């Protein structure tokens, strides 16, 4: 994936992808997606836990924040005596897939392309990660038999659903959905081979998967 530096000790070791994200649950969700969508990817996955605050940044401020994340990703790889072969950055858009989504994602993708030494993927989830979970309704039942995704949330463009987390908490039954359930649901989607057949659509998920295609 990345070019290996001649004579670099790390270049003779393993390769890692570093995932940055707002919350541990988001990073775990992304990890399950990478492992499920790229089963032939033989690299380690590491996390950096620093805040990701990119979506509102522009110009020099965006460049500086991207460069900071890249430095921290390099440091994480170095601490593992590994090559940084990929960087994935997750952030919730807190908005639907509209013109703003297009503008923000393009700016982030361009900035990482200009400032990252390795391939990068932007996971800009619209509205938030819970909207991606809704693409796999069967996975909810694997986590809790009592959970059921109602017709109002099923088989639609989940990137156009405002506040999907609150929708899940109110509408899928007992026990009440919690943020910590997100990784369990995506793990079930991965385990039961649901990831390549989403039920419904979400432009932000499709863009993420398209970027990952180069890594398969």
Image: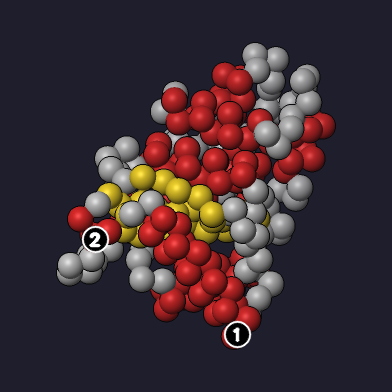
Q: Residue at x 63, y 35 (%)?
A: 182
Q: Position of residue 208 (x, y in %)?
A: 47, 54
Q: Residue furthest right?
A: 170
Q: Residue at x 74, y 29 (%)?
A: 177
Drawn side of residue 22 relative to residue 206, left or right: right
Q: Is residue 199 above or below residue 43?
A: above
Closest to the observer: 198 or 122? Answer: 122
Marker disc for residue 9: 2
Q: Earlier in the sequence, mark 1 or mark 2?
A: 2
| Rendered image quadrant of residue 55 | bottom right
Q: Position of residue 30 (x, y in %)?
A: 51, 45
The local crowd at label 2, few if under 14, some if 14 to 19, many if 20 or more residues have their Cα within 10 Å, is few
- Residue contact at pointers 1 and 2, CB within 8 angstroms: no
Closest to the observer: 129 or 179? Answer: 179
Residue 201 at least partly seen:
no
The local crowd at label 1, few if under 14, some if 14 to 19, many if 20 or more residues have their Cα within 10 Å, is few
Q: Residue at x 45, y 48 (%)?
A: 46
Residue, disc 1: 59
């Amino acid at each position: 994936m990345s070019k290996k530096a001649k004579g670099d000790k790390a270049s003779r070791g393993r390769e890692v992808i570093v995932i940055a994200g707002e919350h541990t649950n988001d990073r775990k969700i992304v990890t399950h997606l990478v492992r499920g969508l790229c089963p032939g990817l033989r690299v380690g996955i590491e996390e950096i836990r620093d805040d990701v605050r990119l979506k509102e940044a522009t110009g020099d401020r965006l460049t500086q924040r991207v460069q900071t994340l890249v430095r921290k990703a390099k440091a994480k790889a170095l601490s593992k005596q590994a090559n940084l072969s990929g960087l994935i950055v997750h952030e919730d858009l807190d908005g639907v897939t509209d013109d703003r989504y297009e503008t923000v994602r393009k700016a982030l993708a361009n900035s990482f392309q200009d400032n990252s030494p390795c391939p990068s993927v932007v996971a800009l989830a619209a509205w938030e990660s819970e909207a991606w979970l809704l693409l796999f309704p069967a996975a909810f039942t694997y986590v809790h038999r009592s959970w059921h995704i109602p017709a109002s949330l099923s088989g639609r463009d989940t990137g156009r659903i405002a506040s999907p987390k609150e929708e899940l908490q109110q509408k899928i039954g007992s026990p009440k959905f919690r943020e910590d359930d997100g990784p369990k649901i995506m793990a079930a989607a991965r385990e039961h081979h649901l990831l390549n057949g989403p039920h419904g659509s979400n432009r932000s998920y499709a863009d993420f998967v398209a970027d990952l295609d180069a890594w398969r």
